[in-house]
Image (cartoon, rainbow, N blue to C red):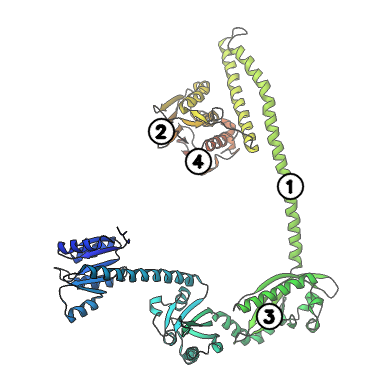
Amino acid sequence: MDEKTGYTVLIVDDDPLNVKLLNVFLSKHHSVLGAYSGEEALKIMESVPVDLVILDIMMPGMDGYEVCRRIKANESTKFIPVIVVTALSSKNDRIKGIDAGADEFLVKPIDRVEVLTRVRTLLNNKHLYDELKSERDRVQSYLDIAGCIIVAFDKDGTVKLANKKCCQLLGYTEDELIGQNWVDIAVYDDEKERVSRVFERVSNGNLESVKVNENGVLTKNKEQRIIRWNNSYLKDSDGTIIGTLSSGIDVTEERLATKKLRESEHKFRLLAENANDVIWTMTKDGRFTYTSPSVSKLRGYTPEEVAKQPLEEIFPREHIEKILDAMARFHDHLKAGKRKYSETFEIEQYHKDGSRIWTEAIATPVFDEDGTFEFFLGVTRDISERKRADEEIKRYTAELTRMNEELKTLDRMKDEFISNLSHELKTPLISIKGYSELVHDEVMGPLNSRQKAAMKTVLDKYDHLSFLMDSLLYMSIVKSGKVKYRLDPVRIEDTLKKVVDYFSFRSQEKDLIMVFDFQEHLPLMKGDVEYLPYLFRSIIDNAVKFSPNGSEVLVRAFEDKDNVHVMVSDYGIGIPEHEIENIFKRFYQIDSSKSRKYGGSGMGLYVSKTIAEIHGGKIWVESSEGTGTTVHVIFPAMSRSN
């Protein structure tokens, strides 16, 4: 059985039997759609890509002629082939169908072979058209991204193709240009006769004389522009000249600049004679033809002496290379048709006393009205002071770099010192804690209530100092890159309860109510059992610290989409809105007076943020001054199936 072609055929007929018959003929090779009125057919074509339409003429309501006209009038469907089916066979009926845009005709009764043949022929033609259109669109896209104007003409000067750059320059759309005579639409009156002769020479095979030429064009807004064209033949497969392909660049500003330059030569010389910078002109072989009098101040030579000096007497050898390179680039630009550009370079020059002077030179090529190079126009200024300043800046930069490296070394030494100090303090502190617990627990003898409370305070302060040292140690190893995490399944509510228990003495001292609100059956998360408690100790420490006596601290944990969400809320002093973005910075404290009143090192939230991010989580704060603070932390939850 033959495979289907992939084409879709739409059959439009108010008689279901006719639709069914054509479906039988065509469905073996094509996808077939049916419509039983003109309105239904047009609606289908709005939503379904159709490759060919078989259309009955005699239908109630909108007849086949009208349907065909609408298909051909629609920009998106006008190239879809339409076969008109009619029981009528008069000449007038065919003319009416052709006027409507029909591509083929079938006369009832329909012959199967004839239908298949005509459908196959039209679909083959459509396939070729689609390929051609695709290739044309591809070529057009290349032309549109080209940096120059590109236009194709036939031998009479009729526009056959115009790229986007051309349309933008002239202010016309592509549809407005295609099919128009170039001389009539885009050339101003003074140039029409000359441009017409160009097309005449091309059509006579005399391209060489006009291969490169300039002429004026007129935009849609009646603005005159000057274009430099490069022309080549367009030939058919037999080698016959069928037109011209022209690429052009807009040289209007360049021509106007040249004209103004020539018109203002007297003013130029007058200004040059009084300028502090040296103004000069130079031939393409490196000979100075004019130098302003200020050269005497710069180099100690008169303009007449400079005119006689070869380059070797003006510039050190290593700098002559820069000049020769600039001239080589000039010739490359000239070959490419580029005339509007300048070169800026720094070079040393010899002074008459034998010393060297650093100068900055700006050189621009100047062309005459015919596009022929005339000379280089340049300005040179003394930059010795700037060079000395640059050297001073380099010296300072090197010194700053050295000092920065020293600071980095000191910073590393500081981190190592903190790390070592934390370790050194840990050992005696452990002993202090051990003996304090023995005293507190009355192992070494009974205590009265005041002594008991005092020992409890000692243990509480030990915990606070231990937490501070652990934070310093953690920051030190994080910065050194030596911290190692082990992420195992963790129940976040267990961690939170342990941390809150840690603050039981302080919360009792302030008569705080610690409220837990944990969702049942929370999913597990991956966490480091050593470092995860530090995250919440910092957060809950702040909540307890800044809460007024007798208030509440709320600790919530709940499932939030694919995350475990923890919230710690207090009714304390709050945080000014403009300070919120800074509170996670290392050692940052909002107000030094508050840090003295409430205590704190500025490390806690930095540590919390670091640990949260290591766990793939995120931390943020909601707060306003005087109303309390809520800290949010979310972690990726483990899948319950795991």
Which is more N-terminal, label 2 or label 3? 3
Categorize mark 1 by other alpha carbons within 10 Å: few (<14), some (14-19), many (20+). Answer: few
The numbered mark at residue 234 is none
Image coordinates for residue 17, horizontal then vertical, percent:
15, 62
| In front: label 2 or label 1 | 2
Image coordinates for residue 73, horizontal then vertical, percent:
28, 72
Left or right: 213 in relation to 48 = right
Q: Provide the residue designation for mark 2.
A: 559
**How far apart, in angstroms, are the residues tagged by discs 4 and 2?**
30 Å
Which is more N-terminal, label 1 or label 3? 3
Categorize mark 3 by other alpha carbons within 10 Å: few (<14), some (14-19), many (20+). Answer: many
**How far apart, in angstroms, are the residues tagged by discs 4 and 1?**
37 Å
Left or right: 247 in relation to 401 = left
**How far apart, in angstroms, are the residues tagged by discs 2 and 1?**
51 Å
Vertical side of 89 occupied by 584: above or below: above
Which is more N-terminal, label 1 or label 4? 1
Vertical side of 118 occupied by 273: above or below: below
Image coordinates for residue 11, horizontal then vertical, percent:
22, 64
Q: Provide the residue designation for mark 4.
A: 576
Q: Provide the residue designation for mark 1.
A: 403
Residue type, mark 4 in image: Pro
Whether residue 606 is visible to the viewer of this picture, yes or no, is yes
**How far apart, in angstroms, are the residues tagged by discs 3 and 1?**
47 Å
| In front: label 4 or label 2 | 2
Residue type, mark 3 in image: Phe
The numbered mark at residue 376 is 3
**How far apart, in angstroms, are the residues tagged by discs 3 and 2?**
76 Å
Question: Could you say whether the residue bearing mark 4 is in a helix, strand or loop?
Answer: loop
Q: Are marks 2 and 1 in contact (CB under 8 Å)?
A: no
Question: Could you say whether the residue bearing mark 2 is in a helix, strand or loop?
Answer: strand
Categorize mark 2 by other alpha carbons within 10 Å: few (<14), some (14-19), many (20+). Answer: some
